[in-house]
Image (tube, helix red, strand yellow):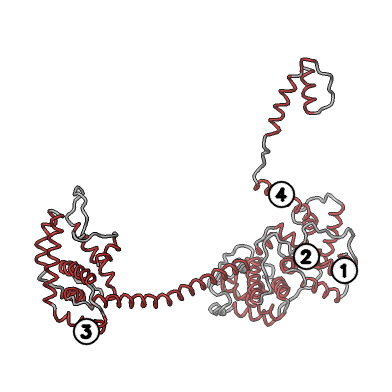
Amino acid sequence: MHDELNAIRRLYGEPGISDPPPDAQAVPAALAEMKAALDALPPQRPDAFVIDAVVAAAGEAAWAAALGPIRQVYDEEPEPLVSAQAESEAAVLAQMKAALDRLPPQRPDLAVIDAVVATAALPSRPVPVGATAGRAADRPARAAPRRGVVAALSAVFALVLVFGGGLWLSRDTAAPREIASADRFEAEKQEVDAAPLVAEGSAEDALEEPASAAPTEVTGPLAAAAPQRTASPAPANEIVQNERARLADAMAADVPAASARRDMTTAPAAPNAAPNAEMAALSADRAKVEGATLASEEALPLTDGDEELQLLYLRVREMQAAQAGLGWDTPLVPLGIAPDSVPAATGWMQVRVQR
Amino acid sequence: MEHLPDEALVAAYVDHGDERAFRLLVERHQDRIYGYLVGMVRDREVANDLFQETFLRAIAAMQKRRGSYEKQGRWLGWVMRIARNAALDHLRSRKKWQDVDSGDEEGTSFFERLPDEGPDATILLDTAERVEELRAAVEKLPPEQREVVLLRHESELTFREIAEITDVSINTALGRMRYALINLRKTLIPDAAK
């Protein structure tokens, strides 16, 4: 036991070490290893808030001790003063207190007292406006607005102002861009319209008609075709395509007056436009689609300036019509794609290609 | 009637409209209320106006027209809170009052101590000149210290009442008084500050 304690003493550098026996060398090695492992343990510290609480408690204790003299002078739960310095301070504070106590009182003017008492004798007399402004008279005093809060609110207001102004300016500059885009689109459209395509003009004129003036004679055939679509979607596509072509021709013949109005709007561009066979073919195809869809649905409240939107809308409606009879177990088939058109893209781009 | 406590006079006025009771209340506490007001605003005319406004508010509250007086038992403390609100409203309207966080001791080191010396006989207010010097010294105190001095020495409130009215702890009120006395002494005895 004595040798083991010597090993511990040696390990920790404590005095009182005697010569170790020859066979006791292994014990210090093991102890040294354990001591090194213990030394390697990371230190554990209390949370920061614990430190803060301890420091605060120390501060309060120091404060309470420093308040000893003033407590004694004003007889506010005094405790015995423990130092000569505290006693000296209490004496000085007591002298200052005595000086303040000897100050003569100050009184309001007698007229003020009379006015107050007169007011008290008139219960119905209203309190001057602004005296309390609807607040409890004995409310706790309001806290003055903090400068930091005021500065933060000012910064937020400035940011809102900057962003608002930016949005307003961007809105003002975006409008001319939209107008320019519309003009460019109109010019392109006029080039296409310049070709002698009666069917396209007729179809677009039909779009300009009010909803109540939508052709009624074409709803019959499509209505007759509807049961077939619900029974078998694939044959319905063929029927729709046939009906489109037939109805487009019929509409071109049936609405000469509308076509004339349209010719008036497009006439200035006609002499300058060169015939384009490809564009004419695309326009004819589009006229078929528009005519057929318009015949089966209500008229669209759109104008020439929204032609691309019209085409997208018509495309969606056509796809919806073709999907009407599909069930969950119906095999997936391409929707609304003309057999002779192979789209280079899908969705909105597909519509553009079909034009 | 002069010996009736405040609450009895308040009841006589509120319940029976006894004007004389109210006059007694005003005259009994005029020094406390006016002394605080004139010390805060440092202007007798303004203090007169605030004194009147304080009682107008108090009358309205006591007659249930506005406010919350419920005969709490400390009429003077209640009126002093009204007076303080009136004074602070006035000072804030002239940007002469800046609230400070509780515990902020106006830039004075908390452990600042008085010089290790005894009382000085020159502080004795043996002349009118010394009285005015002391009043001027009180006026120069930081607002929070000045307010505690006024509430304690002019209004004769306890430190508990001062703490309630000013929304601070008793220790904070005591600490402010301690610094106020130290600063007053430094002002009246310049050598003491060295």
Question: What SS does tag 2 mark?
Answer: helix
Q: In the rendered structure, which disc, 3 or 4, sits on the residue that comes first in sequence?
A: 4
Which of the 4 quarters of the picture holds residue B157? bottom right
Q: Is residue A100 above or below residue A184?
A: above
Residue that numbered label 4 is attached to = A55
Dot 1 amino acid type:
Pro
Looking at the rendered image, the disc whose residue lies closer to the viewer, 2 or 4, is 4
Q: Is residue B188 above or below residue A77?
A: below
Q: In the rendered structure, which disc, 1 or 2, sits on the residue that comes first in sequence?
A: 2
Question: What SS does tag 1 mark?
Answer: helix
Question: What SS does tag 3 mark?
Answer: helix
Residue that numbered label 1 is attached to = B190
Q: Residue A239: x, y in percent?
A: 12, 60
Distance from Cα at disc 3 to Cα at disc 4: 91 Å
Quarter the C terminus of chain A occupies: bottom left
Q: Answer whether residue A43 is visible to the viewer in this image.
A: yes
Looking at the rendered image, the disc whose residue lies closer to the viewer, 4 or 1, is 4
Dot 4 amino acid type:
Val
Which of the 4 quarters of the picture holds residue A151? bottom right
At 85% across and 50% down in the image, what residue appears?
A: A83
Dot 3 amino acid type:
Met
Distance from Cα at disc 1 to Cα at disc 3: 103 Å
Which of the 4 quarters of the picture holds residue A248? bottom left
On residue B180, which mark appears?
2
Asked if labels 3 and 1 touch by Cβ distance under 8 angstroms, the answer is no
Looking at the rendered image, the disc whose residue lies closer to the viewer, 1 or 3, is 3
Distance from Cα at disc 4 to Cα at disc 1: 35 Å
Asked if labels 1 and 4 touch by Cβ distance under 8 angstroms, the answer is no
Q: Are marks 4 and 1 on the same chain?
A: no
